[in-house]
Every structure is written in structure tokens, then in C-alpha cells.
Image: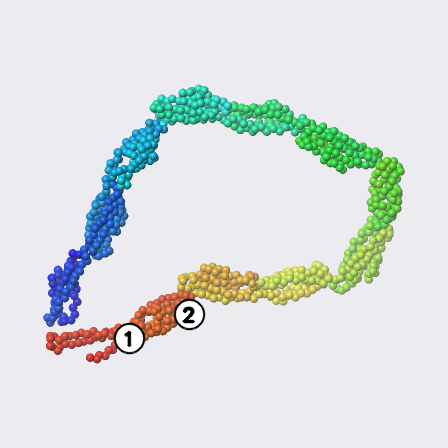
Amino acid sequence: TCANDCDGAIDVTVSGGTPGYGFTWSPAPPAGQGTPNVSGLCAGDWGVTVSDANGCDTTLIFTVNAPPPLDAQVLVNDATCGGNCDGTASAQVNGGTGPYTYLWTPAPPFGQGTDSVAGLCAGAWSLLITDVNGCDTTLNFQVDEPPALQVQFSVTDATCPSNCDGEAEATVSGGTLPYTFLWTPAPGAGQGTSLATGLCPGNYTLLITDALGCDTLVDFTIGAPPPIVPNATVTDATCSDVCDGSIVLAPSGGTPPFTFLWSPVPPNGQGQAEATGLCPGDWTVTITAIGGCDTTLTLTIGAPPALEVQLTTLDATCSGDCDGTAEAVVTGGTPGYSYLWSPAPGSGQGTPDAGGLCAGNYTLTVTDQVGCDTVLAFTISEPSPLDPQLSITDSGCGACDGVAVVDTVGGSGPHTFLWTPAPPQGQGTDSVSGLCPGLWEVLITDANGCDTLVAFTINTPSGIDALPAITDASCADVCDGAIDLTTTGGVPPYDFTWTPPPPVGQGTANVAGLCPGQWSVQIGDQAGCDTVLVFVVGAPPPLDPVPTVTNESCNGPCDGSATVSPVGGSGNYAFLWSPNPPQGQGTATASELCAGDWTITITDQVSGCDTTLTLTILPQQPIDPGLQALDATCWNICNGTATVSPTGGVGPYTYLWSPSPPFGQGTDSVAQLCQGLWQVTVTDALGCDTIVNFTITKPLPVVSSLSIQSETCDGPCTGAAAVFPFGGTGVYTFNWQPPPGGGQGTFFATGLCAGTSYSITITDSLGCDTTETFTVDPFIPITPNLSTEPPTCAGQCDGSATVGPVGGIAPYTYDWTPDPPNGDSTAQALGLCAGVYTVLITDDLGCDTLISVLITEPDTLTLDAVVQNASCGGGCDGSIVVTPQGGTGPFSFNW
């Protein structure tokens, strides 16, 4: 198994000769001499002499081989710097029998088990290499490193916390010259050298790198005396305009005693730790310790914000009014303000809002919580008083033509004017006209609402007057009334103008031929004055008949009637119908009237007044039932409806449906009607009727054809179903339950599982539906049912194979590989040689199965012969026994 191992072996199998064999090995093996099996052999040649029972022998030479010896070396890369673990090693192996395994000791960080390792520290290492036969070899090696960098460091602190005069110096040994130096942060001077100067107090690092890139990092700190901490106590000024602030310093740190320099110079305390009498603002002080270290700080003397007062005033609205106001809005200072108004206001003393102020000068003193105050002066003004001047023109005789004009000064313009009573012209202005005699007032108001009221009188000469004597008309429609006037006043003689013009007497005081109603007269005198008077001529109340008409009915023509009921007059009437009615002439009711116009004249037998009225008898109108029927929505539901909306005839109507409906008999609407012939009789209030026949139909039932596909070879829940509806009405909707994997709402559902009971409900546009239930068969894999016939002899190609598949979904297709001479796409392949064939059987859904077909042939006919040689040369006692192998028995022998 390995070079230099002696574990080889030789096993000899002997045939021929005469059994009872002897074995002599040379050289002598460690084990097995005299037997056909020897072991413990080293690599080399070995010989064996085999003799049989008859003394016949033969000699054989065998060679025992061994693999070449393992030959390995390790290539080493040392660590780059002292202390670094970045050495590497790789093994190169020859000989042995690959593949090899690698065991590095100690275990490396990277690459254990491979031929290359990394991350090696300086030191001794070993590698054990083993080949596939377990042969191994061990190599020892060393990883070296350069000497490590060594640093001696000295630091000089800064003299003050704010001074940058510290120093640092490095003394380096080890590593490989030359060195580089990187100071962080950068020093004032010396970057790149071993000496850094100008260092401020703080933390630094120094990176030292030698010529090989090996480096070391040194952290150090530049110290300083402790900084001066002022510890200031500031007292603000009490008011923004008062200088009573102070600052007290109690410094720590640094090296006392301290000196103090204030800027600007304070009223008290220059050179001291306490400064007083300070005004609000910024103050700077420099504190210096022994050694010259100092610190400067700026402190602020605060104060409450200055009092700021925004004052809003409103003047008195009218002259002499004390309704001025003042409102103060205060900011700044210290809240908690007090208010002093002078002189004292009508209201609001002590508050920011003062009211009841008369015109004049005022002051407001505002004081805050700490006593800071400010004073504001202000003035309340008032407008000048209203002073109206009125100019009046009196009215003429009997006329309304007076004029008034007012001229207003003072107040705050513009002015508004309100005259009482309202004048015909000029309301709202300073000049009005068309004023009748009497007492008038004008209210004058300025822009501030200040007003004054002025009263005045419009005068006129004495007026014309007339006393009427009225004679009423004899009837409401007779014009025989009269008016006679007796006129006084004014300056006679008079002129008379009547409206409307009378038939008799226009221009005089006496008129006649007047119809009942209103008449007016304008009377003018010699002074040009006039007056207008209105009179009413009366009459007896007019006759006002109330007619009642009954039109012709369905019982025949000329059965109408008319009645009048007079209102007004004396109550003693005469009646005259035209044309002459068959019944009722001279009475208030005429009957047996034919369709057409009839005239009735009614006369008051006391006054002789009459009135004429024309009445119309309408012919009988046939009843129109206005039928609307709705068919049943589904083939198996009685939900037809019918409604009549009759016109014509005389309401109200009665209804008789036949046959009697489930709901609505005796009403104008019936429901739940089944398919068939129906009838409704509509009768009006006079007993006239009409009959309507109608038919309720129903749609064809919803019928479906269902096609079901079992699960496929793609897995469970791959079944499908399609439904094909007909009948019903309009568009169908589909509801599969339980919901399928796909196709819900369509005619085709997919993703159906075997063993689940499904239903499909098909609903048409009218809501009619039908439901079918079904199940999906599980997928049955294709079983080929193979039978074969071998070739008749070895080497011949007359074998056959036949498959009879079951399962899947027929029909099937067949694909033989390799292609047979006959039947490639059929269930039977013919002319097959011995060998392995495959046939792919695919069903109608595309599911397939691939099977291997082994066609065997009889073994080739061979003979095994056992030969018995002659016992020795020249003898005739040999024999031969043959045993046929292969072929198909029985056999025949021909020597």
C-alpha cells in the first residue's frame, strides 16, 4: 500500500493438470509458502512453481508493485513585522497516491486541511501529509519575524491651559531603518520628525513606521496647569434705566493670587473681584494668575425689559359727550402692572382701560411689579356741535307742494336726514318737496351718530268741499244711477271734471246714467285751487247662480241633467231654458238633456234683474282600463303582476279579476299570477264596465350541461369543470361552491380537488337559477402493463414489446426510443434487437410516464470442454466431455 511497506499478496487459481497441486515460491514469502496464497510481500518479482499429482509442473513469475514514496516540501513566507501573525506556508507534494490530507500543527487561523495556510505567527510549525492509502510524512518548518519596534518617549507639558508650548520626543530602536513619524493632531512644528513642538494641552497619537511598513502607535497627553474658572455671580439691574447691577468673582484653578481688570471701568471695584453700580449691558473682565496664565470672559448685566406702552384712544363721539376711551397695552418691565389715570376717568381707574372721558388732556402712569414706571400724555377731542338752518316754502291751496331745505354746519360729515312723515320727494336728502300742509320734523345725524331734531309747519289756504246726493242703479248690470253735488268753500264759480266721463252731466255738478261702481270728480275754483272727491254708486246684489251638471252616461244618450241654485236677488226667481228641455222648463232643474250647450235665464221677479248662464252636457266617455301586465320572472315561479289605471266613465271604479288571483282581488293591482289567461272587469260608479283579457307568460327554465375533468398528473386539486347553460333570460352568473381554485364567476372552474362535493348555481338576469352537484375523480397514474418477446437467437432482431396502458385519460400516444423498425407510435414495437428501450406513454391531458423495456436474447451457444489428457506421452487414455452453454436446449452433438 505504501512505498517500503511489505503488505503485498498473490493469490493463484490453477486449472488443468491433475489436481493435487504443489506450490514452491521463490524467494520464500513471509507467509503462505506451499500454498496458492502468499502475503507479507515487499515490492518486487516473485516466482512460483506449480506441480500436479502426475508430477507435471509449470513456473510463473509475478510482480508486486508499490506506489512511489511521498516527497514533499514546505514553502514559507515569514511574518512581515515583529509581533505580526501574517506568515504563510504552502506544501508541494509528489509521490504517494492522491488525493492528500493535510494536518498543520499548531492549528493555523486560515487554511487548516488544505495545502496552503495563512495568519502564521513566528515560531515552529509542522505538517503531516497523508495520501489516500494512509501513507504519510511529517515536515517541520520555522516562521521568522524581524525585530519589533521599541519606543522611549518624553513629554513636556504646556505652561498654561491656553498656551501651545508643550513638546514630545520619541527615541526609537528595533525595526528596520529609516523611520517615519506621523503626529495626530498635527503639532505646531516637527511633523515628520521625532520631536514635536508647539503642542496645545490635549490628547495626541504618534504613528512610527519603519522601512518595511511595520508600525507602532503611541498615545500621549500634553498637560497644563488647571484652567482658571471664574465662578461669577451676576446680579441684574432692577430696572432697564437703573445702574445698580453687580458681579462677584470667586475664581478657582490657576495659581492664586489673582488680579482683575474690568472693561469698561466700573463705578466701583476696578482691580477687585467685585464690581458694583453696573448699568445693564456687557462687562468684560480678565483674571490673571501667578505665572501669567489668564482668562477673559464677558458677562451681561440684565434688566427687566423696558416698559413699553401702546395707547389707543377714541375721541368723544359728539360735542359735549363724555364717552371717549383710552386703552393701554403694556409690554416689558416685570408683569404685575398698576395704572394711574389723571384726571380720573369716568370708569376704569386702576385698569388699562379708561372710559367716560370728556374732551381734554390726560396722563397715564404705568408702574411694574418692581416699581419701574413710565408716564404717557394724551388728548381726548370732540367734534363741533350740529347747527341746522331751515328754509320753508308753504303749500298752495288744496295742494301738497310745500318745500323745506335744511343747511347744517358742525358735527362730523357727512350728514343723514330723516323727515317725518315721509315726504313725496327728497327723503334722505337736505331738501324735500311735495309737502302737504301740517306738522313736519327732520332728524339730522352726523357720521358719529350725533343728531338733532327740528320741527316745522307747512301752511295752506282754506279748501273746497262738496256734499253729494247719490241715486243707486236699479240692478247690478243697469246704468241708471245719478250724483248731485252741493259745493262750498274756495272761490266760486267752480269747474267739474268727472272720471270716468258720465253719460249725462260732464262739466256740471249733477251727472246721471251712472253704472254701479266708483266715480271721482275734480272741483276747481277761481283761485286755482281744486280738490278731488270719490263717490260710489250702489246696486242690488247681482244674481250668482251655482250650476250642477250631470253628463250623459253609458246607459244611453240624452240622459244628462242640469240644475242651477241662484244666490243673491230677492229669492223669488223665474227660470227660462233654451232650447226647450224635455223635462223641467220653468224650474231650476232640466233633465233628459242630450249632449250640447243649454242656456238658462234667471229673473228676479221683484227687481226684474236677470242673468244668463250657458251649461254644457258632455257625451258619455268609455272606460279605458290602462292595463299593464308583467310576466312571471322564472319558469317555476308564479310572480306575474297586473295593474289597471282606468280613465273615462265615472269614478270610483270597482275591479273583478278572473280567475281569482292569490293577492289583490277587488283592487286595481294583483300579484303572484301564474302563467295563463286572465281577465279583469272594471266597473264605474254608474255601473258601466269594460272587460280586458291578458296573458301571463313565463321564460324557459335554465338548463345546463356539465363537463367534468378529473385531477391531472400535475398534482392534487387540478380537476376542472365546465358548465354550458341554455334557457332562462339574458346573461348568466355562475357561483361554484366551495369556491374553486380559479374561475369563480365564470362557466369554467379550475383547481378542483378530488373527494370534494361541488355545486354550480347558474342564475339568469331575472334571478332564476338551477343548481347541479358533482365530484371530481382523482388522477389515476398511467400503468403500462408491459409484455415482451425476446429474439429467437442471439444476434437476431425479431423481438417485440407491447404496452397495454390503463389509468390517465385515453387516448394515448406512444414514443419508442430508439425507434423500432415497426410500431414507433403504436402500443406494439416489432423487430427489436436485444437491448434497452424506452417508451413514453402520454395521455389526452399531456400526462406521461416513461418506462424502460429490456429485450434479452438467448446466450450465445458455447461449449465448455473438460479434457482428460493422456496420462503420459504416447498413452490413449484421454477423454473430452463437452457441456453446452447458452442457446436453447435440447442440443444435438456431431463429432
Pinpoint residue 420: horizontal percent, then vertical percent. Answer: 74, 34
- Left of 469 or right of it: where is 813? left
Circle nearer the N terminus (2, 1): 1
- Left of 21 or right of it: where is 147? right
Q: Secondary structure at mark 2?
A: loop
Marks 2 and 1, how far apart in space?
Answer: 35 Å
Q: Which residue is mark 1?
A: 793
- Determine the residue positioned at 27% across, 40% down: 211
State the count of labels.
Answer: 2
Q: Which residue is mark 2?
A: 811
Pinpoint residue 100: horizontal percent, then vertical percent. Answer: 23, 54
- Determine the residue positioned at 63% across, 24% down: 360
Q: Which quadrant is the N terminus positioned in?
A: bottom left
Q: Amino acid at mark 2?
A: Pro
Note whether 805 is above or below 236 in the view shown: below
Pinpoint residue 166: horizontal percent, then vertical percent. Answer: 32, 30
- Left of 549 or right of it: where is 46? left
Q: Which quadrant is the C terminus positioned in?
A: bottom left
Q: Amino acid at mark 1?
A: Cys
Q: Residue furthest bottom?
A: 894
Q: Can residue 189 be seen from the camera position used here?
A: yes
- Residue 554 falls in which quadrant of the image? bottom right
